[in-house]
Amino acid sequence: MKQQDVSILQYPWPYEIGPFFQSFYEEQSDWIDTDYLFLSEAARTKYKKHSLMEAASY
């Protein structure tokens, strides 16, 4: 099967980081470190890199 190039998505609104980003980041990190102790340290670090709090900070 031949690979096809896919264009980069562009949205009509600007990309902005929410005003509560930093406080949500700290809350998310604490939450992952306290409630997900059954995961390895490497897995918890990987989850933190997903930055889900950027979408939830509005």
Image (cartoon, rainbow, N blue to C red):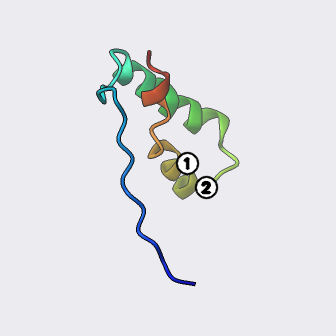
Position of 45 with respect to 7 (left or right) is: right
Secondary structure beneath dot 2 equals loop
Give whichever of 6, 28 is nearer the camera: 6
Q: Position of residue 31 (x, y in %)?
A: 57, 30
Q: Disc 1 on helix, strand or loop?
A: helix
Q: Residue at image x 57%, y 54%?
A: 43
Check disc 1 and give the amino acid type.
Arg
Residue 57 vertical position relative to residue 2 in the rendered view, above or below: above
User: In terms of depth relative to the viewer, which is nearer, 39 or 13?
Assistant: 13
Q: Is residue 27 left or right of residue 36?
A: left
When asked about the image quadrant of residue 24, the answer is top left
Q: Position of residue 37 (x, y in %)?
A: 65, 44
Seen in the picture, residue 7 relative to 47 is either above or below; the reply is below
Q: Residue at x 57, y 37 (%)?
A: 32
Which residue: 34% across, 29% down?
Answer: 12
Residue 44 is tagged as 1
Per the image, the residue denoted by label 2 is 40
Q: Is residue 55 above or below residue 58?
A: below
The reply to whether callout 1 and callout 2 are in contact (CB within 8 Å) is yes
- Real-space Cα distance between discs 1 and 2? 6 Å
The residue shown at (65%, 51%) is 39
Could you tell me residue 38's position as x and y percent? Answer: 70, 48
Position of the C terminus, as image quadrant, is top left
Q: In the image shown, does 54 or 36 lie closer to the viewer?
A: 54
Hey, what amino acid is under mark 2? Ser
Residue, far right: 38
